[in-house]
Amino acid sequence: MTETVDSLPLGQAMRPFPITGHDVRARKIWAELSADPALAVWRTHQVVSSVLEAAIAASPYLTGLMVREPTRLARVLSAPPAAHLDQLIAELSVTMASGATVPAAMTLLRTFKSEVALLCALADLGQVWPVMTVTRALSRAADAAVQSAVRLLFQRAAGRGDWLPP
């Protein structure tokens, strides 16, 4: 039985980036990033290198997400993208429902948004997901974030007696 793209880790499912350049800065950043033990498995993977170098060259935002937390990049590359998105949404829902404080919830939501953004961008740039799948994934993530935040706020309001649940 052959593996489908949906069951492959994102890094293995990627196709070469269609536009290659000679961005020395991007290559240097990827070389530094790939020295991290969490990314060692991807260091010599040419397709991953081409996609990440293109992302680094074109997007300061994605570069920041990768550089600030290389383990996040490793998680994104090492998991099947749809399953990873499902896991992120489930973890957010459980963690937020466990009675997080507002500052902790804000941190959780920022972390969630960052990982979803990196996942969707690389799935798009690596030609793993078509644009409609990327859009659907971003919509699901936004719905999950808003839903979990609103639930938390209603839980807190009910706990203070400011709102009486039905």
Image: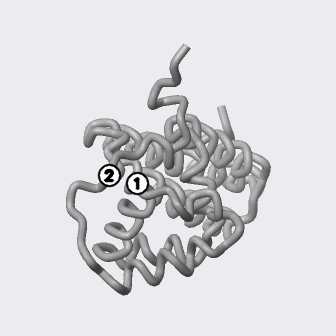
On the rendered structure, is 112 left or right of 133?
right
**Label disc, if present, on residue 16 of the rendered structure:** 2
The secondary structure type at the circle numbered 2 is loop
Label 2 neighbour load within 10 Å: few <14, some 14-19, many 20+: some
Looking at the image, which residue is at 56% across and 58% down?
Answer: 42
Q: Quadrant of residue 105?
A: bottom right
- Near-viewer residue (10 or 90): 10
Q: Badges 2 and 1: C-beta atoms under 8 Å apart?
A: yes
**Amino acid at the residue labelled 2:** Pro
Q: Quadrant of the N terminus?
A: top right
On the rendered structure, is 18 left or right of 4?
left
Q: Quadrant of residue 68?
A: bottom right
x%, y% of residue 24?
A: 34, 85
On the rendered structure, is 32 left or right of 25?
right
- Near-viewer residue (15 or 113): 15
x%, y% of residue 121?
A: 38, 56
Q: Is residue 108 above or below residue 144?
A: below
Looking at the image, which residue is at 53% across and 50% down?
Answer: 145
Q: Is residue 76 above or below residue 66?
A: above
**Amino acid at the residue labelled 1:** Val
- Near-viewer residue (82 or 5): 5
Residue lying at the far top in this picture: please name it: 1
* Residue assigned mark 1: 47
Q: Is residue 65 above or below residue 51?
A: below
Q: Quadrant of the C terminus?
A: top right
Label 1 neighbour load within 10 Å: few <14, some 14-19, many 20+: some
Residue lying at the far left in this picture: please name it: 19
